[in-house]
Image (cartoon, rainbow, N blue to C red):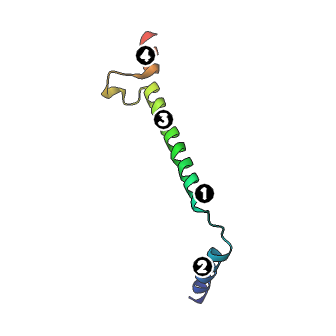
Amino acid sequence: MSSFTEYVQASFQELQTKVTWPTWRELQESSVLVFVASLLIAFIVSAMDWVFGVNASDSMWSGVVGLLYQLL
């Protein structure tokens, strides 16, 4: 049990002295970057779902690929 206590104390000391914490401004900038990247990825996935006609059985739209299959 003493080794666990030493581990917790050493971890706490390392977090206080050796870790460089971001400033409030850096934290805000990183948060905005993550938010914009998440929106971009969500848009790309939604566009891919629309093009390939995901959930086409629930609607009349079968996607671009489904339309090409119907034409050929």
Q: Amino acid at mark 2?
A: Phe
Q: Looking at this view, name the residue that lies furthest to the top.
A: 72
Residue 53 shown left or right of residue 19 in the figure: left
Give 23 or 43, whichever is nearer the viewer. Answer: 23
Separation (CA) of disc 2 from disc 4: 61 Å
Separation (CA) of disc 1 from disc 2: 23 Å
Q: Position of residue 70 (x, y in %)?
A: 41, 13
Q: Looking at this view, name the residue that lies furthest to the right.
A: 18
Q: Secondary structure at mark 3?
A: helix
Q: Residues within 10 Å of mark 3 (few under 14, many from 20)?
A: few
Separation (CA) of disc 2 from disc 3: 41 Å
Q: Amino acid at mark 3?
A: Phe
Q: Residues within 10 Å of mark 2 (few under 14, many from 20)?
A: few
At a point 56% along the width and 47% down the height, the residue shown is 33
Q: Which mark is residue 67?
A: 4
Q: Which mark is residue 43?
A: 3
Q: Earlier in the sequence, mark 2 or mark 4?
A: 2
In front: label 3 or label 4: 3
Q: Looking at this view, name the residue that lies furthest to the front.
A: 25
Vertical side of 40 occupied by 54: above or below: above
Q: Secondary structure at mark 1?
A: helix
Vertical side of 45 occupied by 70: above or below: above
At a point 62% along the width and 74% down the height, the residue shown is 15
At a point 31% along the width and 28% down the height, the residue shown is 58
Separation (CA) of disc 1 from disc 3: 26 Å
Q: Looking at this view, name the residue that lies furthest to the bottom.
A: 2
In front: label 1 or label 3: 1
The residue labelled by disc 1 is: 26
Q: Amino acid at mark 1?
A: Glu
Give 37 or 1, whichever is nearer the viewer. Answer: 37
